Amino acid sequence: MTVSLYDRLGGYDALAMFAAQVVEKAQRHDELARFWVNRNEDSNARDLQSLIDFLVNASGGQMYYRGRDMALAHKGMGITAADWESFVGVIVNVAGETGVGETEGKEVMSFLDSLKDDIVAA
Ligand code: HEM
């Protein structure tokens, strides 16, 4: 039986912690902070839960993702390729801190690659 990426990453609590740390660091990042200017706490809390649901769903956990698809959710934000690199840098950093394994890290990176064209503005 193959074990899902979700289980190998440590299940719900591990993914929720991971997502919270990525968002927190992105919001404090010099280049990325501008995307969260003037958003209220409730919007940020909802977005974080959306991100957790999305990641649980995409990695093979039991969660129904009710948010928008990645193209619609990021449309008009003007996310550049450099922003994308910064965001990936944050993710790699958190993955290192939380001890994500090499195989799992590669799977996460290829999943992120598959989203890039939808998220980065053309
Ligand atoms: C440079 C990269 C990124 C930036 C600056 C960014 C920024 C944002 C912001 C500001 C929102 C709130 C949108 C709104 O409601 O107005 C959002 C939503 C969201 N983002 Fe990102 N994002 C980035 C990359 C990603 C990646 C890589 C993922 C997935 C792994 C992701 C998943 C989501 C999800 C699930 C939502 C919520 C959509 C919904 O609830 O409908 N984002 N993002």
Image: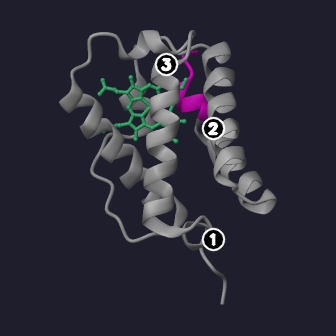
Residue 8: give its label.
1
The spot of residue 66 in percent (x, y) is 27, 51
| Dot in front, 1 or 3 | 3
Please tell me in which quadrant of the rendered image residue 45 appears: top left
Marks 1/3: CA–CA distance = 29 Å
Q: Could you tell which of marks 1 and 2 lies nearer the N-terminus? A: 1
Coloration of the structure image: one colour
Q: Is residue 2 left or right of residue 53?
A: right
Which three-letter amino acid code belongs to the residue tagged 2? Ile
Determine whether the beta carbon of the residue marked 2 sits less than 8 angstroms from the nearest atom of ligand 1.
yes
**Residue under label 2:** 91
Q: Residue at x 63, y 71 (%)?
A: 8
Q: Is residue 40 left or right of residue 112?
A: left
Q: Residue at x 26, y 18 (%)?
A: 39
Residue 28: give its label.
3
* Highlighted magenta segment, given as a residue range: 116-122
Is 16 drawn above or below residue 4 in the view shown? above
Q: Secondary structure at mark 3?
A: helix
Marks 3/2: CA–CA distance = 13 Å
> In which quadrant of this rendering is ligand 1 seen?
top left
Residue 42 or residue 113, whichever sits in front: 42
Image quarter where the N terminus lies is bottom right
In this orientation, does residue 22 appear?
yes
Q: Could you tell which of marks 3 and 2 lies nearer the N-terminus? A: 3
Please tell me in which quadrant of the rendered image residue 68 appears: top left
